[in-house]
Structures are given as structure tokens and as C-alpha cells.
Image (cartoon, coloured by chain):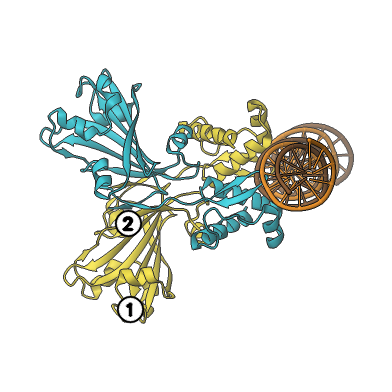
Chain colours: A cyan, B yellow, C orange, D brown
Amino acid sequence: MSEKMKLVDELISDIKEGKYKPNEKLPSENELADQYRIPRMVVRKAYEQLQELGFIFSKQGRGSYVQNRKKQIPLILTGDISFSEKMKELEYDFRSENICCEKIPYESDVYHALKVLPSDEVYNISRLRIVDGCPIALHTSYVAKSVFKQINRDGPGITSIFQYYKTHGYKEFTSGQSQLSVVFPNEPERKILKCSSLIPLLLLESLCMDKETGTVLEYSKIKYRSDCFTYLI
Amino acid sequence: MSEKMKLVDELISDIKEGKYKPNEKLPSENELADQYRIPRMVVRKAYEQLQELGFIFSKQGRGSYVQNRKKQIPLILTGDISFSEKMKELEYDFRSENICCEKIPYESDVYHALKVLPSDEVYNISRLRIVDGCPIALHTSYVAKSVFKQINRDGPGITSIFQYYKTHGYKEFTSGQSQLSVVFPNEPERKILKCSSLIPLLLLESLCMDKETGTVLEYSKIKYRSDCFTYLI
DNA sequence: AACCGCCAGCTTGGCAACAAGATAGATTTA
DNA sequence: TAAATCTATCTTGTTGCCAAGCTGGCGGTT
């Protein structure tokens, strides 16, 4: 196993150093196996892992090629300005897509974070953030019906949720302490974010409250593709 | 490939839900293969990935077992109090180990961040952070000899670098904007942090400056094991 | 009864042979 | 000549078999 990892390490640094350029063909599995005097299976496993890490792609009968990596977008992680505003400031070709609005079954963490009763209804409003045509973040907001009475009807049309809050008379927002962790995408997330299975996602969990009244407006989870951003805090 | 990922997803959620408890034996590769009507190789690959992700461990001739996961330590990511202080506040069994102090070859990023000339000497001082006996973070400070004349002699003894700065007359510190990203450990890092290859590390890069004079005291990279922390910002 | 050694049957680990897909060049055909 | 087809050879993908390691039970010996 260690043999494979050495190879993975080496190939990654080769790619990062530009020894192999994007879309360039890598040595065939057999070539590399002969060169390093290791079984082809080891090279094969290394290549498979590099695929899952998003560094290369392989085609049966053709070979393995360097995947061109996404550019890193600097992103400010403090939560009190909206995602769209952040992106517009940075002048990226940015758009948002509403991909889901549905009532969720009872979940104690979410209900507790929102400070609502189990009898309340909570809606999941998910938007996909797309920069230069690439989906780069999945933003899920949990909103209680007791706070926004018509959320079930309005939900599907929302792309900027801060706009929505403003039209409901909330002017200034504050987010409590946010929580950061690293997760891997599950099957639907991989599909939506168009990423391979070993791309770590940076998960930011936070609340959004009305500054004046302290009402909890939403509990949100944002999953950022870690290969697309560097985060500034 | 998708077949394997489905299985990985499912097994991970089974483990997280507690369907398989820590140190419990998982079904053998053949059992699972028969059960799901898939080739053993697929199960095998899934198990291999789960090993690298730190969820299970396998022993030849015995079977595969659930690894007991580390507990998540909440950690405040703002940089102006020292790591040791943070840990002591949280009352963890914490210690630091100085593992490296050596002059680094010229590297433009580091020298530029420190605002020193190429002719200057820069030292790498690395400490391993250990909580409850588990190494959980690798803290590397880059320090210029022009700022701390005796760093080459003092370096190996440093465990709390803030203490060191204070004894040199610096009282208050400020860190500029910090940069956050996600990386995977390379071979020596895996060894030092005792983690498997697919444990993402949260990399925090920042400067430490003297508040009074603005002198750049250090440029530091901290690599946190993402399976040991949740970060608060 | 207690101990030791052997063996059958399970486990994971590794590998070599084969399958399938792509391509380029030679060969055939219109 | 130009187009179509075949073929040798390269690529990655898959499979099935055997090796290596462990365990528990059986049987013989002390």
C-alpha cells in the first residue's frame, strides 16, 4: 500500500510542478510499472486514486491524461454579506440556481438551531452557486414556516435569500458563531457539484438572525468545493 | 466505479449511524459480494478506500473492523491567542513537541511573506500538537534570522513560540488576513500525524506581526487533522 | 486431564491472464 | 486515387485463481 502512496505523492507533485501539463498524456500503466519495477496493479491503483482526487482522467484504450484544475477563487468567509454580493465584488461570472424547495421531515438538530417546535414546518431551500459555468457551492437554507408563512409557495423562486428577507421587512442581519468542518460529497452532491468522490467539501454551518429582534431567520449549510477556493478569514 | 462508491457511501452512513460499532467485525468481502451480487473486487476496493479514509482497518486472515473515530474538538480559529492557551482553556490533556528546527532553502513565497531579502536566513520551527496522546496538528513557523538573531540556537528548545517572542520584548501581536485551504497529507506528514492518506488537513496560513512596530515576526502554516476538529469562526 | 501439533476452512492480499476499447497503418476494393 | 475495411498493437478494465495469514477444532501424546 505504501508503494502506491509514494507513487501518488510523486505524481501529484509532478503535476503540480507542471512536469505534466493539463491534457497531456501520462505514461501508460505498463511503462510506469516497468520504470519503477513495480507490478502494474500498483500503478493502476495509484491512477485510480488520482482520478478520484480529480487530478487525472483515464479512457479505456487511450490512456490517462492530466485534468486541468480549477482556478482558486479567494473567498471571504465572514457571513454577513451575501454570496452573490461577494462574487459580484470579485467580478466573477456568477449565477445561482434554485434546485430544491421542500418540507423536511423532523430533525432535532435543525429544529433546535432554528428554535422552533417539532409541530412547526421547516423547508429546505437549496441553491447551486455557479462560477464560470462550474458549480462550486451548494447552499442549503432551512427556514421555518412560522417565520415566513408563505415559504412553501415562494421557496422555488428564491435565488437570493437575503433579498427575500428584505422584502419581508428584515433590514439588518447577524450570524452567530459559525462552524467549519470538512466532509466528502455523497452521491447526489457529487452529481450536483460535478465533482469526483474525493474532493473535500468545506462545510460552513451558521445561523442568520434579524439584528433588531434576534429572530432566527434561517439555519444554513454551505458546502464549498475545496478545490475551487482559498478562504480568507 | 460507481458501484464501489455506492457501497462506500452506504458503509460510511452505516458506520456513522452506529449500525456497525467501533471494533466490530464487518462482513467478509465474500459475504458482502454475495449479498449485493457484485464481484468481490468491488467490495475489496470499497474496503480499501474506507481504510484510507480512516473508517476501518483490515487484517489479513482475520477480517475488517470498524476503527473508532476521534472525538471532535471545538477549536476557535482566530489567530491572536496561542494554541496552548486555547487548549488549556478547553481543559484538554495537551502537549507540544518540537520536532524540527532547520534553515530552509530559499523559497520566494515564504521570503516574500516575511518581507525579508533573499540574502537573509529563514528557519523552519515545527511543533507537533498532541491532545490525549493523539497528534492533531502540525504547526510550522518560518522565522527570519534578521529578526531573531539567535534563532538557530534557540529554535530546537521552543515549544510555545509566543513565549519566545515575549522574552524578546514583543508584547502584543496581530495577525493579518489568514488563508484557509484543504490539503491531503504527504508521506512525512502522515507519519508525524499518524493518519491515513485520505484524511483531509485544514491548512491555515497566517502572519504574526508586532502590534507596535508592524514587524513581521513569523509566517506560519498550521495543518489541522480535519477528523479531530470542528472549527468555530 | 492437559498440552501440543496438525489440518481444514475461513479471512485478506496479490497477480497474471484475459477482455474490451482505441488507433494507426497496411490492405483491399470501388 | 480515394474510400473502406481489416489487422496488429497499444491502451485501460475485469476476472478468477492462488498465496499468505489466522483460527478453531480434532486427535494423539504425555
- Subunit that carries the residue with mark 1: B
Q: Are marks 2 and 1 in contact (CB under 8 Å)?
A: no
User: Is residue A39 shown above or below A186?
Assistant: below
Q: What's the residue type where badge 2 is placed?
A: Gln
- Please report the residue visible at 50 percent of the width from the left and 35 percent of the height from the top: B12
Query: Which residue is outermost to the left?
Result: A212
- The image quadrant of residue B40 is top right
Pointer 2 residue: B179
- Please report the residue visible at 44 percent of the width from the left and 75 percent of the height from the top: B105
Q: Is residue B151 left or right of residue B46?
A: left
Q: What's the residue type where badge 1 is placed?
A: Leu
- At numbered mark 2, what does the secondary structure look like: helix, strand or loop? strand
Question: Label for residue B117?
Answer: 1
- Are dots 2 and 1 on a single chain? yes
- Subunit that carries the residue with mark 2: B
**Depth check: B69 or A79 in front?**
A79
User: Is residue A230 shown above or below D23?
Assistant: below
| Residue B13 appearing in the image | yes
Where in the figure is residue A151, as x and y percent of width and height?
24, 22
Q: Is residue D12 left or right of residue B119?
A: right
Where in the figure is residue B166, as x and y percent of width and height?
23, 71
Q: Is residue B122 left or right of residue A151?
A: right
- At numbered mark 1, what does the secondary structure look like: helix, strand or loop? loop
